[in-house]
Image (cartoon, grey):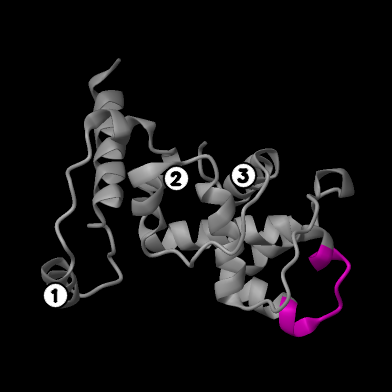
């Protein structure tokens, strides 16, 4: 392994560790981070094996993880979105994931569209919550709890294959390596 590749790998592991530690919320001001740190009970340190097992997307900054979760939600709703003429719903999705990502979701061939889970009202939080279920499916214990921090609450339990397919398509749409 070259020194550049090793440096890149160490940086990715460091980002995963910071995400699992909850220290990666760049959207917060330094004062807000310090206050949250004081008010949050201390967490047990994560061991190296847990950091290595964390998914690659965990190294993304929180705002990009939230966008990835919303994109997973949109992928899960691709069939419903493709058949929709509801401008409000399409607008919510477009603002949450970006117009290019929405176009990519709408362009998914019918064979790649997943069975749409039941979601009544669709807003940005519901979209992200649906995607959170897909991102966290298969993760357990403390890793899942820590990666759920900052994401909208999971709305439902998904079939493992359905969640994996949604994650794979969303990672491709967002240009994130699996």
Mark 1 touches mark 2? (CB < 8 Å): no
* Residue 147 can be seen in this image: yes
At a point 22% along the width and 57% down the height, the residue shown is: 23
User: Marks 1/2: CA distance?
Assistant: 27 Å
| Residues in magenta, as a range | 80-89
Assess disc 1: are there few (<14), some (14-19) or many (≥20) residues with their C-alpha within 10 Å of its C-alpha: few
Label placed on residue 164: none
Does 53 appear above or below 120? above
Q: Is residue 26 left or right of residue 81?
A: left
- The image quadrant of residue 26 is bottom left
Query: Contact (CB < 8 A) between labels 1 and 3?
Result: no
Q: Nearer the viewer, residue 21 or 120?
A: 120
Give residue 172's mark.
3
Q: Is residue 67 above or below residue 95?
A: above
Q: Position of residue 68 (x, y in %)?
A: 53, 56
Q: Are marks 2 and 3 in contact (CB under 8 Å)?
A: no
Mark 2, Cα crowd under 10 Å, few <14 / some 14-19 / many 20+, is: many
**The one of 30 and 103 positioned closer to us in this rendering:** 30
**Viewed as shown, does residue 125 lie left or right of 144?**
right
Q: Which residue is mark 2?
A: 57
Q: Earlier in the sequence, mark 1 or mark 2?
A: 1
Mark 1, residue position = 35
Q: Position of residue 111 (x, y in %)?
A: 87, 43
Circle nearer the viewer, 1 or 3: 1
């Amino acid at each position: 392994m070259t020194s550049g590749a090793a440096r890149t790998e160490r940086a990715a592991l460091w980002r995963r560790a910071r995400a699992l530690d909850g220290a990666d919320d760049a959207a917060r001001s330094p004062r807000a981070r310090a206050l949250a740190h004081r008010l949050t009970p201390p967490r047990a340190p994560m061991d190296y094996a847990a950091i290595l097992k964390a998914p690659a997307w965990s190294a993304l900054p929180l705002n990009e993880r939230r966008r990835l979760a919303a994109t997973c939600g949109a992928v899960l709703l691709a069939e419903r979105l493709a058949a929709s003429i509801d401008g409000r719903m399409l607008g919510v999705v477009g603002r949450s994931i970006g117009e290019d990502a929405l176009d990519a979701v709408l362009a998914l061939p019918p064979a790649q569209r997943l069975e749409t889970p039941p979601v009544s009202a669709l807003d940005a939080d519901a979209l992200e919550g649906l995607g959170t279920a897909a991102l966290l499916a298969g993760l357990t214990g403390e890793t899942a709890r820590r990666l759920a921090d900052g994401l909208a609450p999971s709305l439902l339990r998904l079939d493992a294959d359905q969640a994996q397919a949604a994650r794979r398509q969303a990672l491709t749409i967002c240009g994130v390596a699996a």
